[in-house]
Each structure stands twice: as C-alpha cells, then as structure tokens.
Amino acid sequence: MENKYNLTLEQNIFLAKRNLVDNVYANARMEGLNVTFPQTKTILEGINVPNLKIDEIQCILNLRDAWEYVINNIHEEFNLDFICKINGFVARNESIFWGTLRNGRVEITGTDYIPEIPEKGKVEEKIKEILNIENTTERAIEYMLYGMKGQLFWDGNKRTSTICANKIMIENGNGIIKVPDNKLEEFTSLLSEYYSTDNKEKIKQFIFEECIDGITFKNN
C-alpha cells in the first residue's frame, strides 16, 4: 500500500480543522446516529436543535472534543493511554465506563463474532506491532480495524478507532479517513464480513479507495 496523499503537517491540520463538521458528522453516522449534516453544523455552532435528543447532541459534542484534542495534541505519543483519552471524550456520559478498557463480555449486532475481553498487555503489544508497519496509511487503517474488531471499550469503538487512526494520518500528512454517507452501507457490510472471517483485505482496500480525503495541488 502506498500513501494516497503526502501533505505537510500544517496542511493536514488545516484540512482537519476546515472539515471538522464533516468529520464529526461522518463519525456520528458511522455509529448509527440519526442526525443530518445541517443539524451537526448547528450543534457545533452552539445553537440548540430542538428535535434532537439530549444524548444525540451529547454525542456530537463529544466527537468535537475528541477531534479537537487530536488536533491540539498531534505530537503526543500514540499509545494505549492516548487511545483511552480519545475514548474518554467519545463515550463520555454515554457508557457505564469510558476511557478504560472493557472488562466484560459484549456481543456485536449482525454477526456471531464475540470479541475477547481485552488484556492491557496484549493490547499494548498489538499496538506496538501495528506501529511497526512501514507505510503510515496502512498503519492507520490497520489500527482502525483492530480497534473496531477488538471492541476495546464498552462503547464508541468505531468512533474511537477512526479518530485514533486519523491521529496517525494527520501527523504523517496522509489525509483524513472518513466513511462518506453514500458508502456507509457497503462499509458496514464489509466490516461485518471482517468480523466473521478475519479477512481484512477487502475492507482495507475499500477504505483506501473510498474513505480517504486529502488536498490535491495543481502543478504550476
């Protein structure tokens, strides 16, 4: 796998900030939140949206805080502590616990796959293994899929994994990973297939081809 985009850190941070509403919206839709792009933009502008539930508004604000933390702390080491911090933002007031590894059994709707209860040492070893992947775009995608399938936390695993993957993307100038609305159904289907078969080549290629945005500069 090659990097689809090769930006400077400043260019990639600009991209992340400029598309913050779109990134938050995409993350919310991925998690199944029934919210529109205009509603997301209105919430992030600090204006009340009366026809949304409080927990839906909370989800949007949590995602904003997680993205802002990544952007403002882009040089922080990527490790389990960082990942737990992101989940702490993402799942705040949504779960029985947030920001700590899951310590009980969960099931995933739509598949018979049951993830193991994560053990800190094994998770840290897996993170180190992923960080040794030479290509940085592939590194980000691999972490994203590992975090989703591993279900490291009680809630917000897809959101947490995507935002953490974008930390890797941004700091290496590789663009932004987000699943567009019109590709969400296909992504969900491929993710379920990955959960069931452990074959991730299809979904890795799909993410690379359909879910990475960047900046293309016209040559003078």
Image (spheres, rainbow, N blue to C red):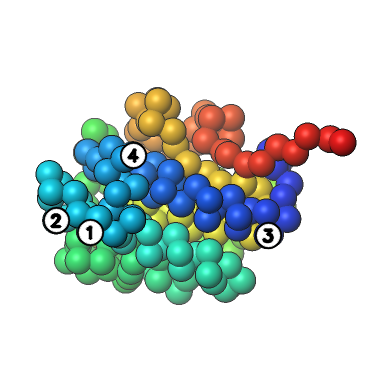
The residue lying toward the viewer, choosing from 58 and 80, is: 58
Give the mark, 1 or 3, whose residue is nearer the N terminus.
3
Tell me residue 170's x, y (percent): 61, 56
Residue 87 is at least partly visible in this image: no
Q: Residue furthest right?
A: 220
Label 2 to label 1: alpha-carbon separation = 6 Å
> Mark 3–mark 2 contact, CB under 8 Å?
no
Give the mark, 3 or 2, whose residue is nearer the N terminus.
3
From the image, tell me which residue sits under label 3.
Answer: 10
Give the mark, 4 or 2, whose residue is nearer the N terminus.
4
The residue lying toward the viewer, choosing from 122 and 72, is: 72
Q: Secondary structure at mark 2?
A: helix
Residue 110 is at least partly visible in this image: yes
Mark 3 crowd level (few <14, some 14–19, many ≥20, 10 Å Cα): few
Q: Give me the residue at 66% from left, 48% from top.
A: 174
Quarter occupied by the C terminus: top right
Label 1 to label 3: alpha-carbon separation = 29 Å
Q: Secondary structure at mark 3?
A: helix
Circle 4: residue type: Phe
Q: Is residue 116 above or below residue 23?
A: below
Q: Is residue 123 above or below residue 31?
A: below
From the image, tell me which residue sits under label 1.
Answer: 58
Q: Is residue 92 above or below residue 41?
A: below
Label 3 to label 4: alpha-carbon separation = 26 Å
From the image, tell me which residue sits under label 4.
Answer: 37
